[in-house]
């Protein structure tokens, strides 16, 4: 017979061993979470005019693995001699708010950049043609502008007497352009109603209070440039180079302050990125032009930012088309103007 105290000790030890054994086969802790999605950064360029900026942006993409969206204005595929091939709504033939290409050779060089960018996986979108404010346009006006863009793009080689035309060019012009951004981000119900009929799958003309998930409506996926905090007081500004330019220098060139403006832009981009990267990982959209404002401050800030974040394993710098192909919008019978957009 074991003493009572010894028996009690053996029971306690056995019970503890049983608990340990059962714990070894228990379910994983409830705190386990699935892998987080990659942080998407969508970088785009409006008008897409200067050849040197085409080359610079493509070089940035090659070294970072990024895909960009280029919103092309079709008047840059017409020369002073061929400009009358375009007539904007309620405008005379050969009119444009942003001019035309300087020469046939310039058009040929730009067409080559478009072709190379498309071959490299970039997204070519439409910025319309004459860069007119279409807020008051009718649905018919918008359809006219969309048709003019496709006509000029498809016939750019023939209109300008540039040969040889690549054998697949017309098929590309007819099918590859699936997205649109309105000049001045100036939109309206008529534009939204015309988008799907014109064959577009996404629109990037909106503005939102901060990064938001794209919204599907009427068979179109709608993207919005976010307001992001900027400057010493963190005041919100649209995440686009022109808006920074207007804030920093009143849209007047001050190249002597380039360094300060670049640093402010970089810090704003980086802070907006970190908020999403450490948070819900909503796509971050940043918009640029081919114009080098304030001595190129905003392009230099873009390159610093992209060189740093686009190479991260859990970040992807992709185009609007890339995102839309992964999240195709479902067609709906009724069309509603997206929330958070300029109208």
Image: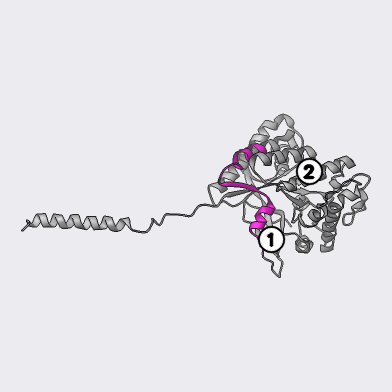
Write the residue at 52% across / 52% down.
36
**Image quarter hosting the C terminus:** bottom right
Disc 2 + disc 1, Cβ < 8 Å: no
Above or below, 38 against 147 in this view is above
What is the C-alpha distance between the residues marked 2 and 1?
33 Å
Q: Residue 129: give x, y in percent of width and height.
A: 83, 51
Using the image as rendered, state which of residue 156 and residue 301 is in the foreground: 156
Q: Which numbered tag is attached to residue 338?
A: 1
- Which span of residues is magenta-colored? 302-329
Write the residue at 26% across / 57% down.
19
Using the image as rendered, state which of residue 325 and residue 71 is in the foreground: 325
Quarter of the image where one finds residue 59: top right
Magenta stretch holds residue 318: yes
Quarter of the image where one finds residue 298: top right
Above or below, 249 against 33 in this view is above
Q: Residue 289: give x, y in percent of width and height.
A: 75, 43
- Identity of the residue furthest to the left in this view: 1
For disc 2, the marked residue is: 113
């Amino acid at each position: 017979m074991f003493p009572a105290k010894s028996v009690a000790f053996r029971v306690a030890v056995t019970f503890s061993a049983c608990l340990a054994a059962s714990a070894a086969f228990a379910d994983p802790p409830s705190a386990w979470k699935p892998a987080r999605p990659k942080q998407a950064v969508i970088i785009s360029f409006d008008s897409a005019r200067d050849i040197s900026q085409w080359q610079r942006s493509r070089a940035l993409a090659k070294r970072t693995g990024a895909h960009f969206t280029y919103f092309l204005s079709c008047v840059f595929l017409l020369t002073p001699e061929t400009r009358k091939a375009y007539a904007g709504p309620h405008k005379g033939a050969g009119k444009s708010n942003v001019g035309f290409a300087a020469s046939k050779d310039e058009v040929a060089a730009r067409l080559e950049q478009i072709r190379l960018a498309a071959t490299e996986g970039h997204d070519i979108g439409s910025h319309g043609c004459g860069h007119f404010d279409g807020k008051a346009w009718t649905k018919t006006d918008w359809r006219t502008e969309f048709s003019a863009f496709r006509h000029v793009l498809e016939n750019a080689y023939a209109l300008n007497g540039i040969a040889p035309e690549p054998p697949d060019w017309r098929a590309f012009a007819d099918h590859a352009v699936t997205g649109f951004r309105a000049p001045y981000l100036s939109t309206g119900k008529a534009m939204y109603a015309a988008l799907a009929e014109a064959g577009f799958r996404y629109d990037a003309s909106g503005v939102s209070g901060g990064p938001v998930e794209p919204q599907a409506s009427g068979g179109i996926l709608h993207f919005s440039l976010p307001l992001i905090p900027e400057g010493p007081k963190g005041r919100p500004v649209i995440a686009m180079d022109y808006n920074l330019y207007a804030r920093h220098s009143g849209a007047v060139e001050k190249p002597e302050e380039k360094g300060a403006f670049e640093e402010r832009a970089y810090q704003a981009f980086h802070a907006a990125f970190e908020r999403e990267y450490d948070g819900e990982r909503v796509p971050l959209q940043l918009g640029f032009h081919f114009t080098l404002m304030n001595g190129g401050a905003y392009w230099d800030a873009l390159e610093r930012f992209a060189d740093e974040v686009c190479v991260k394993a859990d970040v992807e710098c992709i185009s609007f088309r890339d995102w839309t192909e992964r999240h195709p919008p479902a067609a709906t019978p009724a069309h509603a103007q997206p929330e958070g957009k300029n109208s």
